Image: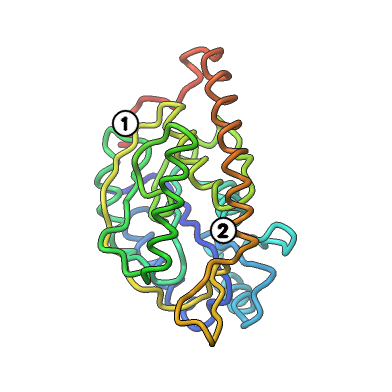
Amino acid sequence: MKLPSLSIVTQTYNEAPIIRTTLQQLVEVGQAVTDDLEVVVVASEASSDGTNDILANWSVRDPRIRTVVQPREIAGYGQAFKLGIYAASKEYVFQTDADGQFDYLDLARAVSCLGGHDYVHFNRAHRKDGWERHLIGRCFYHLIRLSVSAPAVDFDAAFKLFRRSILDHFRLNCRSGVLVPEFVIKAHLVGARIFVGETEHRARLGGEAAWEVKRWWLPVTLPNGRIVLQNLSDLLVLRREIAAFRRTLRARPLADRVPGDTAH
């Protein structure tokens, strides 16, 4: 089963040691599921280890690789996610991370789940994160669910395959990592038929997590206080956004929802 066209979207931050392997794997799995492929890589302007030079050289050799620069002034995972998916130009979008946390070969399985669905969302099975990251993730999940009515999915799982046309039905306005749940919730509200499955999670192979603060004199990893505050502030924005979006949807004609046709 092949897709008519596909954009693979990922984002990078100081991932020079593994980015060549990641790009090669993404191209290979993309070629296996479509004959019309592009790979959109969001390159953080804040990267300092040569990742962006590698991306620039690779994109010259392979026109399927396209880079989008993430300026320093709009740093963060949520903004990288937004830049990447909106830069995608193909009929389907596969969004994932570039740091080796997922088996990209599972893309073929995600494609097989598309029949009758507009969006395939794989949660992380058997998470290999440290207990600190796992605890923070659970708190983030429950705060989202307390703030708004939302699908019971692993919002941060970077294994999302969806119709690009879903993005035509709403705007994304959060600024922090809360923007990712905003996308999932709004896709659900506009009627996108979501298939929820699982993919095995792996320990990070490379790259840096901007939210982590490591002190040599502490036995644990601390969250970046500035990022935590941004996310907490954005929860209020999300609550207002979803409430306003629900009101807008009630005024829309039913025809202005995600099409109900099948993928193939």
Looking at the image, is mark 2 or mark 1 earlier in the sequence? 2
Q: Residue at x 58, y 70 (%)?
A: 59
Q: Residue 227, percent across and down?
A: 61, 60
Q: Nearer the viewer, residue 45 or 88?
A: 45
Q: Residue 197, percent across and down?
A: 26, 48
- Above or below, 151 against 16 in this view is above
Query: Splitting the image into 4 quarters, where does residue 40 fall?
Result: bottom right
Looking at this view, name the residue that lies furthest to the bottom.
216
Q: Nearer the viewer, residue 220 or 133?
A: 220
Query: Splitting the image into 4 quarters, where does residue 120 fall?
Result: top left
- Above or below, 58 against 83 in this view is below
How many other residues sit within 10 Å of disc 2, few (<14), some (14-19) or many (≥20)? Answer: many
Q: Secondary structure at mark 2?
A: helix
Q: CA distance from mark 2 to mark 1?
A: 31 Å
The type of colouring in the image is rainbow
Q: Residue 190, percent across and down?
A: 46, 27
Q: Amino acid at mark 1?
A: Thr
Q: Residue 45, percent across and down?
A: 69, 69
Residue 84 visible in this rendered orientation of the protein: yes
Residue for badge 1 = 262
Q: Residue at x 35, y 44 (%)?
A: 153
Residue for badge 2 = 77
124 vs 191, left or right, is left
Residue 36 visible in this rendered orientation of the protein: no
Q: Secondary structure at mark 1?
A: loop
Q: Nearer the viewer, residue 240 or 91?
A: 240
Q: Residue at x 50, y 82 (%)?
A: 218
128 vs 61, left or right, is left
Q: Amino acid at mark 2?
A: Tyr
Task: Name the front one of labels 2 and 1.
Answer: 2
Q: Quadrant of the C terminus?
A: top left
